[in-house]
Image (spheres, grey):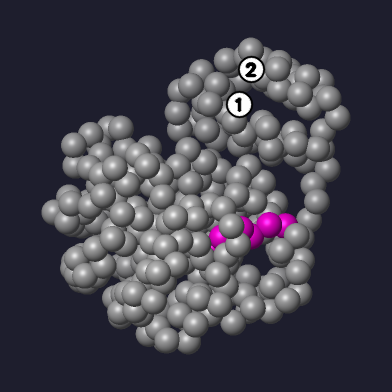
Amino acid sequence: MIWALAPMDGITDTAYRQIVKEIFEKYNKDKTKELLLFTEFVSSDGYVHNFDWIKNHLIYEENEKPLICQIFGSNLQKLLFTAKEIDKNYDFDAIELNIGCPAPKIMRFWAGSALMLDKNNTLEMIKILSEVIKRPFTIKTRVGVNEQDKQKQKEFIIKASEFCSIISIHARTLKQEHSWETDIDFVLDVKNKVNPNCKIIFNGWITEEKLQDTNFMYKMSKLDGIMIWQAGIWNPWIFVDYKPTWKEKKETILKHLQLNIKYKWERTWVIEFRKFIWTYTKWLDNASKYRVEFMKVDNFQDFKKIIDKI
C-alpha cells in the first residue's frame, strides 16, 4: 500500500523529504508500505518566465525516490513546455498536474481547483500532457466543486484514469476547502469504476488517531494508498510506528536545518526554519519560551546553542 506525503509549498522540499525517507527506512517494519514523495508545487508560468525562482523546487537526491514532480498552471502551452522540459532534464518517477489546490493565489490564474470548472477542457489537457511525456502521468484532484458537482466530477475522474497511473483524491469539495468531513464513499466508489491500471490514493483529514482507527484503515485497505497532509507537517515520524525521544528530535532538527542550509543561504533558512520549530517542539515543556529565543537568531551556531540547552 502506498503511503504518500502530500506536496506542500515551503515544506516538502528536498531537505524535508530526505528526513522523512531516512526515518521511514530506519523504523518502518511493515513491508507492505511503500513511501511516495512529491516535490513542492512547480509553477509552469514560473518555469517558463522565471526559472531561477523555481529551480530550487526541482532539487532532489536519488535517495528520495520514488518521487513525483507536481506542476500547476492553466495555460496548455506553458504546461506542455514545462512537462516536456522536466521529463527531459530530470529523472522523476512521474509528473503530476495539480487539479485540487483551493488557494486563492492559485485559482486566480485558473489553476489548481479552478481546472475542475471546465472538465472537458481539463480532460483534453490531461490526455495531451500524458502523451507528450515518456514517464507516467498523475493528477491530484477533489471530489468536486460542490455537492451538486460530485457526479460530474466522478465521471471526469473515471475518464481521466485512462491517461493516469495514479489519481490522488482530496475527499472534500472545493467549497469545503480543508474543513468538514471527508467523503470516503465517493473515493471507494471511484476506485471500483476507474481504469484498473490507475491507482487511487485517498487524501483528507488523516490524523494519527485515524491511522489507529480499525474501521477507517479497513476502508483504506480497499484503495491503493493514503496521502497525509497536515499530520505530516514537520512530523517526519508520521509514517512509522515509532515515538522519538527528545534527544532524537534534537538530532533530527539540526540535521534538517543543515540540509536546508546545504541547498540555500544560511541566514535565509535559519530564519525560515522558525516555522518548523513550532511542531518539532509541540509537546515540550516551556516550548513557548524557547520559540521566542529561536525568533531572535539568524545563524546555525546560535540556533544550535538554543537546541543544545533544551
Is 77 included in the stretch rendered in magenta?
A: no
Quarter of the image for the N terminus: give it. Answer: bottom right
When asked about the image quadrant of residue 206, the answer is: bottom right
On the image, the x and y values in percent for residue 244 come to: 79, 47
Mark positioned earlier in the residue sequence (2 or 1): 1
Q: Amino acid at mark 2?
A: Met
Mark 2 is surrounded, within 10 Å at the Cα level, by few (under 14), some (14 to 19) or many (20 or more) other residues, namely some
Q: Is residue 217 above or below residue 194?
A: above
| 205 with respect to 160 (left or right) | right
Q: Give yes or no for contact between labels 2 and 1 (Cβ–Cβ under 8 Å).
A: yes
Q: Nearer the viewer, residue 298 or 44?
A: 44
118 above or below 229? below
Q: Position of residue 276 (x, y in %)?
A: 62, 34
Q: How many marks?
A: 2
Q: Nearer the viewer, residue 11 or 68?
A: 11
For label 2, the SS is loop
Measured Cα–Cα span from mark 2 to mark 1: 7 Å
The majority secondary structure of the magenta stretch comes to loop
Q: Which residues are magenta?
A: 203-208
Residue at which label 2 appears: 295
Q: Which residue is mark 1?
A: 274
Secondary structure under the numbered disc 1 in the rendered image? helix
| Image spot of residue 275 (x, y percent) | 59, 30
Horizontally, is 167 left or right of 74 in the view?
right
x 33%, y 69%: residue: 136
Residue farthest to the front?
A: 148
Side of 171 relative to 163 (left or right)? right
Q: Residue furthest top?
A: 296
Taking the spot 45% from the left edge, 42% from the top edge, the residue there is: 9
What residue sits 37% from the left and 64% below the top? 139
Quick check: can you spot residue 308? no
Residue 254 x/y as whole percent: 66, 31
